[in-house]
Amino acid sequence: MYAIVEIAGQQFKVAKDQKVFVHRLAGEEGDSVSFDKVLLTGDGDDITLGAPAIEGALVGAKITRHLKGDKVIVFKKKRRKGYRVKNGHRQSLTEIQIEDITLKGGKKSSSSEKTEKKEETKAKSENKSEDLNNYTVVELREMAKDKGVEGYSSMKKAELVAALS
């Protein structure tokens, strides 16, 4: 089982017992941390996709150690001007080990979701008993487009309601 989780502003694909280097996290070595911003989980062919995150899903990890990354040299130069600047940088990192991935909720990703949304919009446009004032301008324009109303893109909400009723 794997998961794509957002840790310290970056997205990582993690699996159980995997070691990952992330930006420095608050906490001491040996502390347990959990990340709730799980974007996707996969277990073979079973994929659960969040919108944007899966509710109830957690990735548990243990802080192994704090360290600094390799040195990166930043060298700037402008030719024929005598301008040269050399800087170095070492990123502060934390090594974590993924302990468990728990999934309590979410929804499956498939093409059936798209067809369900299309069916809902068709049902909305076909059901005349509903009050058209409850729709947004974007939804009214989409209904006008489906109905074949000319000039719907420049109409205001009241004009769209009058044209659709």
Image (tube, rainbow, N blue to C red):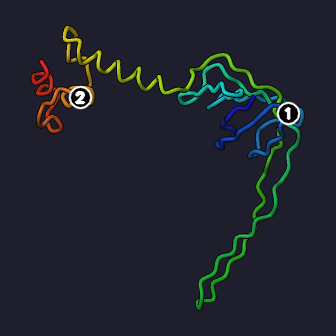
View extreme (bottom): residue: 80
State the SS at label 2.
helix
Q: Quadrant of residue 105?
A: top right
View extreme (top): residue: 129
Which quadrant: the C terminus?
A: top left
Nearest the viewer among 89 and 128 is 128
Q: Estimate the spatial distance between the alpha carbons at disc 1 and disc 2, rounded to whole Å.
A: 50 Å
State the SS at label 1.
loop
141 relative to 103 in the view: left or right: left
Identified by mark 1, the residue type is Asp
Q: Residue at x 60, y 24 (%)?
A: 54
Q: Earlier in the sequence, mark 1 or mark 2?
A: 1
Which quadrant: the N terminus?
A: top right
Residue 18 pos. (x, y %): 83, 37
Residue 59 pos. (x, y %): 74, 28
Nearest the viewer among 48 and 29 is 48
38 relative to 88 in the view: left or right: left
- The residue tagged 2 is 137
Q: Residues within 10 Å of mark 1 (few under 14, many from 20)?
A: few
Identified by mark 2, the residue type is Val
Q: Residues within 10 Å of mark 2 (few under 14, many from 20)?
A: some
Nearest the viewer among 72 and 144 is 144
Q: Please determine whether, in this image, residue 117 is positioned above or below residue 23.
A: above
- The residue tagged 1 is 17
Nearest the viewer among 59 and 152 is 152
Q: Residue at x 31, y 21 (%)?
A: 121
Residue 125 pos. (x, y %): 24, 18
Q: Quadrant of residue 56?
A: top right
Q: Residue at x 20, y 17 (%)?
A: 132
